[in-house]
Amino acid sequence: MATKGDRTIFACQTCGHQSRKWLGRCPDCGGWNTFAEERERVAPKTGSGVALRGMARREVRPRPFTEIEPQDESRELTGIDEFDRVLGGGIVPGSLVLIGGEPGIGKSTLLSQVADRLSGLYGKVLYVSGEESDRQIKLRGERLGINPAGLFLLPETSLERIFEEIDRLRPMAVILDSVQTVYSEKLESAPGSISQVREVAGQFLVLAKSIGLPVFLIGHVTKEGAIAGPKALEHIVDTVLYFEGERHHQHRILRAAKNRFGAANELGIFEMTGRGLIGVPNPSELFLGERPVGASGSVVVAAMEGTRPMLVELQALVSSSRFGTGRRTAQGVEMNRVVLLVAMLEKRLGFQLSGDDIFVNLVGGISIEEPAIDLGIVAAVTSSFRNIPLHPRTVVFGEVGLAGEVRATSHAAVRLREAARMGFERVVMPASNLTGLPEDDRVELIGVRSVTDALDAIF
Ligand code: TYD
Ligand code: MG
C-alpha cells in the first residue's frame, strides 16, 4: 500500500541505477531490459531502521589521529587453512564478507564447514537459510560428518525477524544463505531486487560494525557473472570472495576480489569430495598432475597468486587455419596478452603466424592475470609452432615487453623455491632478477634479457 512519501522508481537489476521511468537500456551499465519497477519508501527522518536493543546511536565527533587506538588485529582462525588465507589470516571481528558463486558450486557446503569449525572453537554460530529447510541443512551436515553443538539454524527470510533472533541468541558469527532470499519489511520490492539486496547488506553492515559481529553473506552469481545487485554490494561489504570452479572438475577456487583486511589476490584451493570440501595445500602438485611430458606446446610456468607460488601448465596449439586468417583463443589467460605476444613474435622473430589458429590454455580451470606468465605463453606458442617439446624439468617466468625484452618480475626467489621443491632443474627467467638471489644448487638459473635469448636457452 502506497503512503505519502512512497514513490515508484525503476531500478536496473544489474547495477542499481535508478530512474523515474522505465528504460529499455541502462545508461549506467549498458544492460538491456534490466529495469524493474520497485517501490521505494522514503525513510522517515528519525530512526535508522532495524536496530538491536541497547544499540542507541552514539554521537560521533572528530578525534585527533594521534589519540585513536589501533584496532587490535585479533583475528579468529577457522582452522580451514585455505579459507583463513583468503580472508587475509582469519576472520576480523565486525567484518562483512560476501561470498559469491554460481548455484551448485559449493557455497553452502563451504559455509557449513566454516560454521562447524567456528562453533566448535568460539561458541554459538547462527546459520540463516532462506533457501533450504533446517532438515535439508542437517542432511548436508550429516554428509559432511559434522554435528556441532553450538550451531543454530534459522530458516527465515524476514530481515527484521532475523535481527530479533540475533538479538536473542547473541551468536559470535552469522551466516546468511543467501542475501537474495532475505527481504526487509520496510521495502515493498521483491526479495532479490536490487533495493532489497542493498538494504539487507546495508543493515548487516551496521550490525556487524556496531557489535563487532562477523557476518558472511552468500550471494548467487547470475549467468552474466555478477552477483545480483553486484556492484551495489561490492562497495558495501568489507571483503568479496568468489567461489569458482568447473562443474566437471573436482577442485574449487576461492578468490578474494576485494579485501579491506588483506591482500585482494589470495587464492584458496579446495577439492569437492563425497564428504565436503577439503583444502589443497599443494596446488602445484594438483596442476601438474596430468602433464603430458615430452609433448610440444606444453610449458610449466612459475606463477604467483597473492603471496603463494604456484607452478601451472600452459598449453598452446598452433595449427594452420582452414580460413585465410587465424583465430586466437585463450582460456585462463588474458586474450589481449596472447594477441599481443603473438604479434610480437611475428614482428621480432619473423614467425609467420597470421594464417594459423592459436589456442592457449591454462590447465586446471584456473585463470592467472599476472604478466610473469608472458614468457610461458611465448615458449608454449613457439614450442607448438616449431613442434619441439621443452626439456621436461624446465620452468619459465618473466614479463615480456613489446620490443621482445624480458622484464623483471616480483617474488623471483619465492618462485624459484617452489620450482626447486617440485623437482625442476632449469629455470629460464629475467636476467635482471638474478642479482641478490639466494644460492640454490638444485636448480640451474638461466637469466635472459630478450625473447630471442630465452628461446635459445629453452630449445
Ligand atoms: P552446495 O553447497 O549446495 O552449492 P551452493 O550452495 O553453492 O548452491 O553444493 C552443491 C553441490 O556439491 C551438489 O551438487 C552436491 C555437491 N556436494 C558434494 O559433492 N559433496 C558434499 O559433501 C556436499 C555436501 C555436496
Ligand atoms: Mg546453497
Image: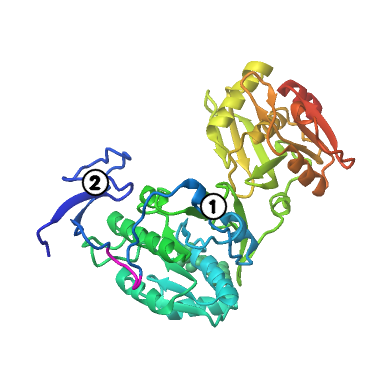
> Residue 237: percent from the left, percent from the top?
43, 54
Report if residue 51 lies within the magenta region.
yes
On the image, which quarter does residue 205 sit in? bottom left
Measured Cα–Cα span from mark 2 to mark 1: 31 Å
Q: Is residue 322 left or right of residue 186?
A: right
**Is residue 250 at least partly visible in the picture?**
no
Q: Which residue is mark 2?
A: 18
Could you say which disc has been placed on residue 123 in the image? none
As displayed, is residue 287 above or below residue 182?
above
Question: Magenta segment range?
Answer: 49-54
Q: Residues within 10 Å of mark 1 (few under 14, many from 20)?
A: some
Horizontal relation, residue 422 to residue 410: left or right: right
For residue 306, above or below residue 205: above
Check disc 1 and give the amino acid type. Phe
Given residues 254 and 359, the one toward you in this image is 254
Q: Nearer the viewer, mark 2 or mark 1?
A: 1
Q: Amino acid at mark 2?
A: Gln
The secondary structure that dominates the magenta segment is loop
Residue 194 coordinates in the image, percent (x, y): 30, 54
Residue bearing mark 1: 261
Locate the N terminus by quadrant.
bottom left
Q: Residue at x 85, y 40 (%)?
A: 425
Left-right relation of 252 to 49: right
Residue 340 against residue 363 in the figure, above or below = above
- Observer-nearest residue: 74 or 316? 74
Quadrant position of the C terminus in the picture: top right
